Image (tube, rainbow, N blue to C red):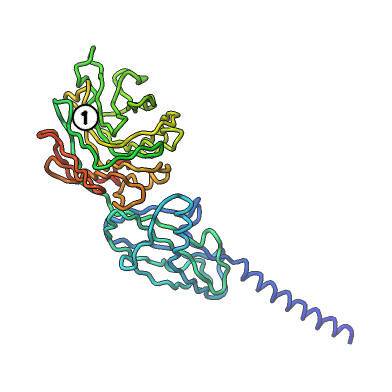
Amino acid sequence: MKLRTFVISLAALCTAVACEDAKYSVIQNRVYIEEATGKDQQVASLTIEKDYDLNITVRLARAADHDVTVKLAVDESLLDNYNKANNTDYMVLPEEYYEFEPETVIHAGHITSDPVVVKIKLFNSGGSPYAFPIRIESAEGATVTQNTSRMLYRLAAPHIQAVPTFTSSRSLVGSKTFSDEFTSPRWTVEFWVKVSDFSNPSGGQGGTFDGCSLASFGTWFMRYWNAGAIKPGLPCLQWQAANGTGYFDSSQFWLAQTWYHIAYVADGSTVQMYVDGEPDFNLATTVPQTFNKMSIGSEGTYTWGNVSVSMAQIRIWTKDLTQSQIKDAMTRDVAVNTDGLFRYWKCNDASGNTLKEYVAGDDFVCNNGTVSWTSGLNFGHLKD
């Protein structure tokens, strides 16, 4: 009797342990998005050049002996957290531009579902940055992981535009006095630029590049300048203020026929130069700068000679942009009503001598015969 009782009790114990083990197994079998593994922030960037099928794979840590039903959902809070952490202003892709089936099943004995296909339609953002944040909302029969259950896709339409090239034997391509101005120790100026030639356009001595004034923005200006360069014949880009702030030279050489994205950012204590989104040289200064006009070319000594200069996406900001903000918007339009945008010349007019200004109507008029146009430049692929 005692033996029978012991056997029954042992059997009951084994049954209980088996039940607990089964329960433990379910709890520990994790479900996640395969594409989210190995990503620091579970973030990816996509350029949508046509209607696009985005495949998302839902995966188990190990095969289960039962079907696991998984539900996915667009999670706006995921995007809100990303914007706050990175000082960006992405918006969720509007519903009319995507569709997908939110439920998928990982069948018993399998570790992955059929891909969840998100059909994204070609969109025109008008400069507004879009993103698609998706998360595993629930899973019947498995535990949803924390980090790898989510993915954020930053979306960009192809940024293809016409660009102007300025060529002048005279010293000034054009100048525009603004309808209003601002003076501040915090500001940002950014643009794309390409120069055709550095082979002695100004008649310098010994065939050495002698200088090329590029543009001025109120109380400071930029020029390509050989004197500060380490290697003769290859210039640096020099920033110089006219109000006693001082100047500094870029730390890298510049190649002809090469597009560069340039940004100067003043945060109240330092003017930092960025080249293609990466920090270059900087200057410690607290002196405010005044923005009351823009000139392209020189109003002084250095003429362009036979140099041709191409520019695009010229933006002036009343705030200091972060590096992530600069890199984020380098290869796309920005919305005209973006906070802090003071002046904006897209330089995509495609014909004529006028560059439209999109914020305050301060259109920039070039001297006759100084501008020509090239169409179809894809800024999204400039650095591929």
Q: Residue at x 25, y 30 (%)?
A: 214
Query: Which residue bears the numbered disc 1?
Result: 297
**Quadrant in which the N terminus appears:** bottom right
Name the foreground residue: 355 vs 25. 355
Residue 50: image location, x then y, percent = 26, 58
Residue 15: image location, x then y, percent = 73, 79
Q: Is residue 35 visible?
A: yes
| 366 is higher (above) or lower (below) than 324 | above
Q: Residue at x 77, y 80 (%)?
A: 11
Residue 173: image location, x then y, percent = 17, 32
SS label for mark 1: strand
**Quadrant in which the C terminus appears:** top left
Residue 81: image location, x then y, percent = 48, 57
Name the foreground residue: 101 vs 236. 236
Q: Is residue 20 left or right of residue 264?
A: right
Q: Amino acid at mark 1?
A: Gly
Q: Is residue 345 left or right of residue 129?
A: left
Q: Residue at x 81, y 81 (%)?
A: 9
Q: Is residue 57 visible?
A: no
Residue 291, image quadrant: top left
The residue sitting at the right extreme is: 2
Residue 103, image quadrant: bottom left
